[in-house]
Amino acid sequence: MARAGARTADWRELRDTPELRAAAREAGRRAAERLEAARARLRADGRAGFRRAAPALLPGRLAAFHLARMAAAGWSLFDPAIGAPAPGNPWRLWLAALSRRI
């Protein structure tokens, strides 16, 4: 947050500022990079690697969904669309496990 110039008071007081959006965008970028690194590792390890790592990595499928949701909201942490229920999450996990993709 400090690198983006965001203030903790803005976050606590639920103020949507450009600096807070920049901090969220940076955090999202870093999360997406880590998610892609995990995907690359799974591709390299093949089916056996997925079986071993699935319990830890399947939530990455949900992370990808929520990162896309945040990007669509313009990285506004207080946009109601971000906190809206996602009833499809169990299906996303099931499909990720079935397809062996996160």
Image: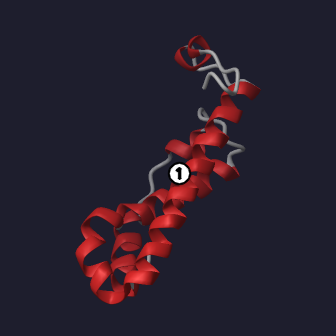
Specify the quadrant of the image occupied by residue 41: bottom left
Q: Residue at x 71, y 34 (%)?
A: 22
Q: Is residue 3 above or below residue 94?
A: above
Q: According to the image, label 1 marks what residue?
A: 31
Q: From the viewer's perspective, tell me whether residue 22 is left or right of residue 10.
A: right
75 and 101: which one is in front?
101
Q: Position of residue 76 (x, y in %)?
A: 66, 36
Q: Is residue 25 above or below residue 61?
A: above
Q: Residues within 10 Å of mark 1 (few under 14, many from 20)?
A: some
23 and 88: which one is in front?
23
**Quick one: which residue is furthest to the right in this view?**
18
Quarter holding the N terminus is: top right
According to the image, what is the colour scheme of the structure?
secondary structure
Picture mark count? 1
Disc 1 marks a residue whose amino acid type is Ala
Q: Is residue 18 above or below residue 100?
A: above
Q: Residue at x 33, y 79 (%)?
A: 97
Q: From the viewer's perspective, tell me whether residue 42 is left or right of residue 67.
A: left
Q: From the viewer's perspective, tell me whether residue 59 is left or right of residue 29.
A: left
Q: Position of residue 40 (x, y in %)?
A: 50, 74
Q: From the viewer's perspective, tell me whether residue 48 is left or right of residue 77.
A: left
Q: Residue at x 60, y 32 (%)?
A: 78
Quarter holding the C terminus is: bottom left
Q: Residue at x 50, y 65 (%)?
A: 37
Secondary structure beneath label 1: helix
